[in-house]
Amino acid sequence: MSGGGWTPGWAIVWDLGGFLAEGAFSADLDNWDPYHTSSQHHYEKQPILSMYEEAHGDNHTADAHGTSLWSIWTGAVFNDLFKFWSSTRGFDQSIETRHSPPEGRLDPSVTHRVRVEFARSGDATVFLDGRTVVNHSHPQAFQLRYVFIGSDNSGSNYGPQSGLVYRNIKVWGTTGGGRQVTARLSVDGRGRAVVEEVAMPGVGRGLLDWLRGVKPSIALTPRPIPVG
């Protein structure tokens, strides 16, 4: 989100309204300390950024259904900065990479940008502050529709990373049918979540669904978005 940013009580689920076969996701993270000794870790596994093919937001269900996802996890159980996990067909095609940059611990006083690009070829690449840090290659294209910010629904030992501030959440890409998509989450002057810059028919109406425990000071106010 742009503006003042958003700190998760739990999560935001963002339905893009169509499936992306190729595209990218980016987020600016403030006060982010993913190191394994960080006091921000209140859960064993923290899926701080994810995209799913289906709305359940559960990696185990994605495995059972043979659907695609990617996710960035932090947590005290990871002796590094984060884990990137991606799949285009359940656990059978899943790849996991744990990333520890050579400079060691990230500075939480600096804004860090995470970008994930996924190609129709099945490749998925993670960029941290403009540098390529992880690349996965899968045998088929992703089909991604649901964005999870903060956490997802994968289990009781999963949850958000405490104190992390999200800003400038953007998604862009191309559906399987060749339609272009561009969308951005932001926070307005009254701390409300809104959706902007949507270029897909149907997107922007009933777009967001709050999960349990969302920070009360931020009200959900999706608005009609001109499309075309």
Image: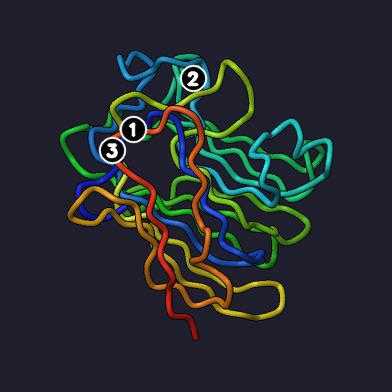
**Is 82 on the left-hand or right-hand side of 101?**
right
Q: Amino acid at mark 1?
A: Lys
Classify mark 1: helix, strand or loop. loop
Q: Earlier in the sequence, mark 1 or mark 3?
A: 3
Give the foreground label among 1 and 2: 1
Q: Earlier in the sequence, mark 3 or mark 2?
A: 2
Q: Tell which of 41 and 35 is nearer to you.
A: 41
Q: Is residue 51 left or right of residue 30?
A: right
Badge 3: residue crowd in 10 Å (few <14, some 14–19, many ≥20): some
Residue 102 visible in the shown view:
no
Residue drawn at (59%, 54%), measured in percent from left and top? 124
Task: Return the residue nearer the eye: 68 or 16.
Answer: 16
How many labels sit on residues? 3
Q: Position of residue 192 (x, y in %)?
A: 29, 51
Give the residue drawn at x 44%, y 67%. Answer: 183
Residue under pointer 3: 165
> From mark 3 to mark 2, how far is it between C-alphas?
21 Å
Three-letter code, disc 3: Val
Q: Earlier in the sequence, mark 1 or mark 2?
A: 2
Residue 215's disc is 1
Q: Is residue 215 visible?
A: yes
Q: Secondary structure at mark 2?
A: loop
As measured in the structure, the alpha-carbon distance from the residue carrying label 1 to the one carrying label 2 is 27 Å
